[in-house]
Amino acid sequence: MTEEITLESLAGVGPVTTRKLNDAGIHNIMDLVVRGPVEIAELTSMDIETAGKLVEKAREGLVEGGLIQKDFVSANELYKKRQSIGKITTATEALDTLFAGGVETQALTEVYGEFGCGKTQFCHTMCVQVQKQKQEGGLEGGVLYIDSENTFRPERIVSIAQANGMDPEKVLDNIIVARAYNSSHQILILEEASTLIKEHNIKLVVADSAVGLFRSEYLGRGTLATRQQKLNKFVHLLVRLAETYNVAALATNQVMHSPDQFFGDPTRPVGGNVVAHTSTYRIYFKKSGKKRIARMVDSPHHPEMDVVFALGEAGVIDPEDATTKKKKTTKKSEPKEEVTETPDISAEPIDSEPKEEVTETPDISAEPIDSEPKEEVTETPDISAEPIDSEPKEEVTETPYISAEPIDSEPKEEVTETPDISAEPIDSESTDLK
Ligand SMILES: Nc1ncnc2c1ncn2[C@@H]1O[C@H](COP(=O)(O)OP(=O)(O)OP(=O)(O)O)[C@@H](O)[C@H]1O
Ligand SMILES: [Mg+2]
């Protein structure tokens, strides 16, 4: 395979350059392409033109090996490639509707939202779902779980597997967990993932809290460029793996409050632009009392919509299943759960908050899910506006797994915001998610 084309075999790369490249974490031609000429020139002290030629050669090699797409392909070829896209169903009607069938392979799906909104639960659920038979909505494949903030819990997998009538032992066996200790290690894991993916028939790569380590390691404006560059590399590697090996890549990203922002959604993904522009699908999870709302924020072909789901022993579940055990009568394609949050603009950054809110109003009343008509557009979760380093530097230290149902202890909030006109237009015709 082309990955095995060595750096030395490229014209102009001698042992000294190879060593410099290796020292900088560039081990194969894929790395060369991902880093690009400017960085290569800086690292090796070769001139930018030579570096450009080198990267171009590497790119051609990858194209020849079918590892990346040619510059020009026929629509027919593209169509064929897309036909092999697999979908992993989500175990809920609601999210399946949102995803138009399930989480796709050959794509990066980014789920973002505040703490406790269910990102990790969703990842765990998908770890089980992907292993199901094809006729049951799975891909009969394994999982590579890149655990950056120690959030993987095998016990949750066991519960979810049991809820699905699957053998927990077998399900656990098919999940390879790679604990990432720092951002470089996180990148390294992806760089070395290709063999693993092939050997273990991996169909889902999860990067839970993908941005967390980059955020904590690169603090302050001075390090923004480096952080973006590294994050960029990580995300591109993820996309590349997804496309090359026909696997689904699922990354989560926490959002933060922007106390300085008075309009628009006070939360935005901490990864900032890099992640936003590379993800193929972006889904925003939001707490709404006991329930959760998911919105397809950015997709090349999904309609924008909101759906309501819930969290339970079985992972992500349909809202009816949260209350009554068996009652799947309603279609959740147009849930209109009332969202009543108020962006607490004066609040501290979300990551620094403990799991329990102090100011909450217990959600004792039944939810008025359908009582509210969809409202007019307004908000734009401001994913694009600010540079990411304006975030607070917080640590996430919570352990969301201790109690089974603290969900309803969340505060009900009011919505009052106005559209953030400076943000990207992707959300500009969103409905009632505030
Ligand atoms: N066994 C369970 N049964 C029911 N609900 C559960 C269970 N385990 C966790 N939850 C719910 O999941 C929530 C935590 O969700 P999750 O850990 O996925 O959040 P997150 O979006 O990943 O947050 P963070 O950004 O902090 O990582 C808990 O608050 C609880 O509501
Ligand atoms: Mg989490």
Image (cartoon, helix red, strand yellow):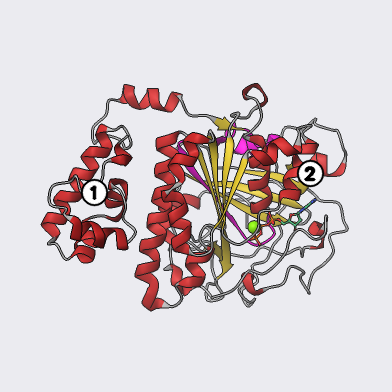
The percent coordinates of residue 76 (x first, y second) are 32, 21
User: In the picture provided, is 48 more to the left or to the right than 29?
Assistant: left
Residue 374 visible in this rendered orientation of the protein: no
The correct choice, above or below, for 417 with respect to 139 in the image is below
Q: Nearer the viewer, residue 69 or 423?
A: 69
Residue at 65% across, 58% down: 151
Residue picked out by circle 1: 7
The percent coordinates of residue 316 (x first, y second) are 72, 44
Please tell me which of labels 2 and 1 falls first in the chain.
1
Q: How many marks?
A: 2
Q: Quadrant of residue 396?
A: bottom right
Q: Nearer the viewer, residue 37 or 24?
A: 24
Residue picked out by circle 2: 159
Residue density around tag 1, few if under 14, some if 14–19, many if 20 or more, within 10 Å? many
* Residue extent of the magenta highlight: 89-117
Quarter of the picture for ligand 1?
bottom right
User: In the picture provided, is 215 more to the left or to the right than 405?
Assistant: left
User: In the picture provided, is 69 more to the left or to the right than 114?
Assistant: left
Is label 2's Cβ within 8 Å of ligand 1?
Answer: yes
Label 1 amino acid?
Leu
Q: Quadrant of residue 58?
A: top left
Residue density around tag 2, few if under 14, some if 14–19, many if 20 or more, within 10 Å? some
Residue at 45% across, 40% down: 195
Q: Nearer the viewer, residue 147 or 112?
A: 147
User: In the picture provided, is 409 more to the left or to the right than 89?
Assistant: right
Q: Nearer the viewer, residue 404 or 175?
A: 175
Which type of secondary structure does the marked residue at label 2 adopt?
helix
Label 2 amino acid?
Ser
Which type of secondary structure does the marked residue at label 1 adopt?
loop
The percent coordinates of residue 104 (x first, y second) are 52, 35
On-image quarter of the C terminus:
bottom right
